[in-house]
Amino acid sequence: MKKKVTSQKVLKAEEAKTQWICHSDSGIRHWHQAEVAGYAAALVFFTPSDDDSGVAHALEHMVLRGCEAFPESRHFFNLRCRLNLDEFNATTQPETTRFHLSGDNLDAAIEGLHFFVESGLSPLLDQTAFAGEVWHTDIDGKTRGALYQEMCGYAAQPTFADAVSLVCDCHCRPALYGGMPDTIPQLTLNHLRHYHRRFYRPDNVLLLTRGDWPLDDIGKLLSRAVTRWQRRTDSEKYRDVPEPIFHYRPKRRQVIDVPTSPVWAAILATELTRDHHQIQLRQRQLQLQAVTSDFLCWPRLRFSYCDKNEQNCHEKNNHEEENNEKENNEKENIAVVALQPWLEGIARRIPVRRQQWQWRYFAMQQGSLVARRWGDSLQRLYQCAARDPDIPNVLRSTTINLAPLCRDTTPAKHGEFLADCPAITRLAIICRVPDRYHNQSVAAWLVHCQQATLRWTWLQSQPVISSQAEWCLHGAHVQVYFVDLELSFADTLLSFWCQTLISAAPEFIQRSIQVTDAGLIAFVKDENGTADYCVPAKTEQRLSVSYHQTTQGWRLCSTFPPETTDSEVCLLAQGIMMSPEVQDRRLEGQCYTLAANLDLMHRQLNIEGIWDQSPIDSISAIRQSLRSLVDEVLVDKAQIIGIGSGAEGLWRTHYNKFSPAYHSALLQASGCETQPDFYHPDVTRLTDIARQMLKALDNVEMS
């Protein structure tokens, strides 16, 4: 067993330097955390949603479609293809709209932040972009638009439909802030311009940054953007206030909202899934609903009636519903009064240790989801800022508080919710073994590792999220047990693994095991004492392309031969995504998005069309982009650097954004490059690969 090379370096939030910065020229509030590695930034506009129109969501799309400083409509998509960043995107939440980025390249980070600030304050908001980005009616009378396609796709998903159904059945109904397929076509450009004038203002935005940013340069950048915004605001004419838009669906059931604190809602929701509590709920003719959903972000205990006789709202018209509103409220109050003592009795019987565990596990789940979706840097940025006492309430995190017992007399909250969660990382036990060693002993040992880890972490009162995975390679298998946990606890768990689990491993694993920052890594050698057999899955000797339909659209899967390097796969993907033909599919609103996803462990590039109206036209656009790569030889140095930077950004998004040490070890176990060279491509080989893919694509059958 080799000695561990380095140890996890944990910078606690209280040890990091945080400060509020006053940019007097712009007036924009700025929270900054210094002395940490990398760069992360979030431009947060406070954008409440008062109806179901999805205007905040539509405006998030629209501000990225050109502004006074960057009027080109496709500039955002070009930046996404060119900037070497881990994350560069925007998201709409119930009460905020966030434009955020992260990465290690300062120049790319500043360029991305500059674009976000200018776009947020001074967007063009023209009718052409509105038609492609939000909605329009085509010559066949069908509704099109990227946002409309997105929400139609979501509405077709069972989980989303259940979330909408729960919202519409609630007594205190929150807004469907993302919009619905029946409300988005009621939006006009006037809605967006009016909403932008109200909420996209320097006094209604907060900038969060993390890393050693040049603060003086940021101040100048903000000042120029605010000056441009002021000129624009002074020249705007007054517009009529648009009417609110609501999605209507009759109530189908009565939902009982029990007033509990978010901490106790998370604890009791877990406890009520036990069999004996489920029997008692069925005796009460009640069914436990999700504690949170897409629109009900604030944890709350909610129940619905199982008895069909109680679900009488479905058959009533509007007038009858209004007349029975008082009766339904009284009925809900009676049900709450009956439930409260029972729930408090359950709460008293839960040991304090399990209470704390369940809440921390709930917070861990939320933190892990944010880290996997947006990356380590942004998860840590939002969490550290949320602990600042001067941060706005909507961004503040909720810490554990077990008193009062479970009652909460405050009205139900429907805004954003963030549980206090420390920095998250991933540790793993990775075993790469030849086929002849691939037997039940490795799988049994990993099961033992999982059981021992869960028992020990319970005794340490440290919740973790764990799972197993397996990949089949050419002549070998990679089997993995991984754990998501608090970064500050990683070294402790790794020490436990070294002291307890290694001795229980099969002998051929023990001989090969190494201890690294990623966890325990075992690369078992073959009979010759080498590991040359281990290359990514070699199912095809030549490049092949296949078409698949998915629940969200379609996927074009390209499998490359072993001699194709990882950097060549990434460069080819960026060459396709940067082509005007492919970008126009998205800009014209024919689909929600076209995305390139890497699976280098299986030597695959997956180009996916999400909620695409015409897959045939999108495949034709990809074919045309390949022809351009074949016909137009890359000789311009700036063009090569641009594609190389974007290819590195694509690779980092998949393998560096979240827990890079784990992904690096996983790539190494699969025979992939851990540090690909994207800036010195063999142009002739890249052209030949594009030609092969084009030829394979011509033979694809679309079912």
Image: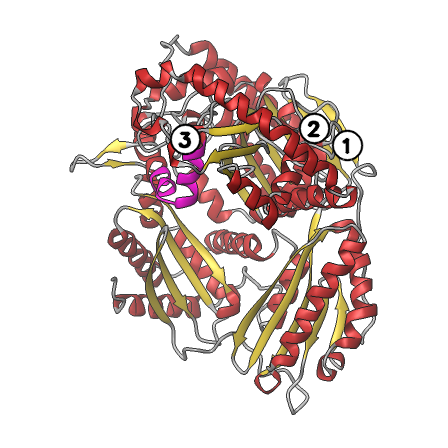
- The image quadrant where one finds the N terminus is bottom right
Which residue has dot 3 on it?
Answer: 310
Image quadrant where residue 315 sits: top left
Front: mark 3 or 2: 3
Front: mark 1 or 3: 3
Closer-to-camera residue (38/171): 171
In the rendered image, the vertical position of residue 22 relative to residue 475, given as above or below = above
Magenta span contains residue 250: no
Q: Give the Cα distance between marks 2 and 1.
A: 7 Å
Closer-to-camera residue (289/79): 289
Helix, strand or loop at disc 1?
strand
Q: Which mark is residue 31?
A: 2
Callout 2 touching callout 1 (CB < 8 Å): yes
Image spot of residue 391 (x, y percent): 69, 25
- The image quadrant where one finds the C terminus is bottom left
Q: Is residue 329 left or right of residue 14?
A: left
Image quadrant where residue 660 sits: bottom right
Q: Main secondary structure of the magenta part?
A: helix
Image spot of residue 585 (x, y percent): 31, 45
Helix, strand or loop at disc 3?
helix
Residue at 63% across, 82% down: 531
Helix, strand or loop at disc 2?
strand
Residue at 44% across, 62% down: 605
Span shown in magenta: 150-166
Amino acid type, residue under disc 2 in the picture: Trp
Mark yes or no: residue 272 visible: yes
